[in-house]
Image (cartoon, rainbow, N blue to C red):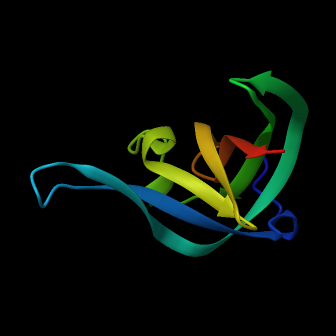
């Protein structure tokens, strides 16, 4: 498998990490910035609109590719549970993380939704 074409990594994306805090004895979950700017490629996979729970929402799947990062290794980190992406003010929840080649890069499959 060929490496990632660096010219395709043209989107500035923020990686956020789930942090669980429990100072008061009651755990709370918050998202903190893990990396402010990571260059990735973006490909919208499909679009759909659906009516759910009295709200019209538009949801779609997006594939992101980035250079290899040890802190995003799908074999060591539960990426879908502990990471998410932020791009242009929209949050993308990671559903799947896949290693490309032999640590050449990582593909992230995400879902984003917004109220219409």
Instruction: Give 113 or 72, whichever is nearer the viewer.
Output: 113
Residue at x 44% of width, y 40% of height: 81
Which quadrant of the rendered structure holds the N terminus? top right
Q: Work out whether residue 27 or residue 10 is closer to the camera in this orientation and state it.
A: 27
- Above or below residue 57? Residue 16 is below
Q: In this view, does 31 lie above or below 110?
A: below
Q: Residue at x 68, y 23 (%)?
A: 53
Residue 8 vs 44, above or below: the answer is: below
Q: Residue furthest bottom?
A: 36
Nearer to us in this view, 59 or 72: 59
Q: What quarter of the picture does the C terminus occupy?
A: top right
Q: In this view, does 39 lie above or below 79?
A: below
Q: Which residue is drawn at 83% across and 61% down?
A: 5
Q: Pinpoint residue 38: horizontal percent, then vertical percent.
A: 64, 70
Which residue is outermost to the front? Answer: 54
Please name the residue shown 73% across and 26% down the image: 54
Locate residue 113, reporting x and y percent. Answer: 73, 42
Q: Is residue 98 visible?
A: no
* Frontmost residue, 49 versus 54: 54
- Image location of residue 70, percent across then percent down: 45, 58
Q: Where is residue 2 in the image (x, y as percent from the top left)?
A: 79, 49
Q: In which quarter of the image is residue 99?
A: top right
The answer to whether one can see residue 55 in this image is yes
Looking at the rendered structure, the number of numbered marks drawn on it comes to 0
Q: Give the residue furthest to the left.
A: 25
């Amino acid at each position: 498998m060929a490496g990632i074409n660096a010219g395709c990594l043209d989107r500035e994306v923020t990686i956020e990490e789930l942090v669980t805090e429990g100072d008061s004895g009651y755990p709370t979950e918050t998202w903190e910035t893990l990396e402010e700017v990571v260059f990735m490629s973006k490909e919208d996979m499909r679009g759909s609109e659906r009516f759910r729970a009295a709200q019209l929402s538009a949801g779609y799947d997006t594939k992101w590719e980035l250079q290899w990062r040890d802190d995003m290794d799908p074999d060591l980190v539960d990426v879908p549970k502990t990471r998410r992406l932020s791009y242009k003010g929209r949050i993308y929840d990671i559903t799947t993380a896949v290693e490309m080649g032999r640590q050449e890069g990582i593909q992230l499959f995400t879902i984003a939704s917004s109220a219409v």
